[in-house]
Amino acid sequence: MNQPFPVACATPPELRSLGRDLPNFATAMRASGPVSIVAIGSSSTEGDGASNKEASYPSRLSAELAARFPDRTFDIYNAGVRGQEAPDEAARFKNDVLAKRPSLVIWQVGTNAAWKDYFLDDVQAAIFRGLGYLGGSRADVILMDLQYAPALLDDERPKPATAQMLELIASAASRSNVGLFRRFAIMKHWYFDAHVPFEQMISNFDGHWLHQNDWSYDCIARALCDAIIESAALE
């Protein structure tokens, strides 16, 4: 990992709750054969800031699920492409998501729009368009929101575009009846309540203080794994 830190990550159940059941994933877990999951998004999914590809959150999620269910096989496809936002990602859904026939899709979205101050109405429209594509599939969907990182903050509070993006994603999840993984709230909890410094959570490899690092990718994967298991009623 990037560097050893003594603070362990813990996420309260109420923060990691997805707010929705995952019936398609639960059905796939009860069936025979591999369980297919697609993680799509930008650099937060691809793994920028991690020391290697195996430290990205999709890879760590795969390891967590395999450890919890050693008798099952999980095919987790990392469809993250750095620099992209909802319109680019939605355009890739046919080939990079639906073609994999997943039982679960995790869509990390919104960071680049907030950071680069895009027209958020365009991003919102693309999110609903993408969710519409997924609505016709036999896949449960989780929207993952932004990371709590200095590049998205002003004096520890979300910048206006960050706050707007968080509200937009939460609204899209609610209106489309899909799960919401509140990465921003979880990492904010680590920062304020667990006193985890940004140096432990965020990489500064490119000078932006935006991307996560090995420690926080691993911790996010652990929280997400718990959330998935709880929402699918697997334990």
Image (cartoon, helix red, strand yellow):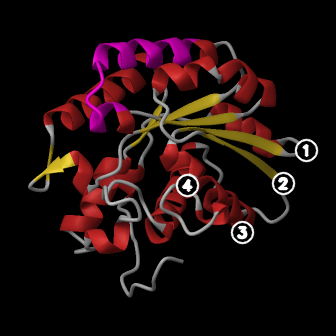
Tell me the residue that label 4 is attached to: 47
Mark 3 and mark 2 lie on one chain; the one further toward the N terminus is 3
Considering only vertical position in the picture, is 135 above or below 110? above
Q: Tell me which amino acid carries mark 2.
A: Thr
For residue 77, what is the image quadrant? top right
Residue occupying the far left of the picture: 155
Q: In the rendered structure, which segment of residues is drawn in magenta? A: 113-132
Tell me the residue that label 2 is attached to: 73
Relative image position of residue 42 (x, y in whole percent):
51, 39
Tell me the residue that label 3 is attached to: 67
Relative image position of residue 109 (x, y in whole percent):
44, 34
Q: Secondary structure at mark 2?
A: loop
Residue at the location (55% across, 47% down)?
45
Mark 2 and mark 1 lie on one chain; the one further toward the N terminus is 1
Query: In 3D space, how far apart are the residues under numbered discs 4 and 2 (Cα atoms)?
Result: 22 Å
Q: Tell me which amino acid carries mark 1.
A: Gly
Q: Disc 2 vs disc 1: Cβ atoms closer than 8 Å? A: yes
Tell me the residue that label 1 is attached to: 33
Q: Is residue 27 magenta?
A: no
Mark 4 and mark 1 lie on one chain; the one further toward the N terminus is 1
Relative image position of residue 49 (x, y in whole percent):
48, 61
Query: In 3D space, how far apart are the residues under numbered discs 2 and 1 (Cα atoms)?
Result: 7 Å
Mark 4 and mark 2 lie on one chain; the one further toward the N terminus is 4
Relative image position of residue 157 (x, y in whole percent):
12, 49
| Other-residue count near label 2 (Cα within 10 Å), few / some / many at <14 / 14–19 / ≥20 | some
Q: Secondary structure at mark 1?
A: loop
Considering only vertical position in the picture, is 207 above or below 20? below
Q: Is residue 43 left or right of residue 78?
A: left
For residue 138, what is the image quadrant? top right
Query: In 3D space, how far apart are the residues under numbered discs 1 and 3 (Cα atoms)?
Result: 17 Å
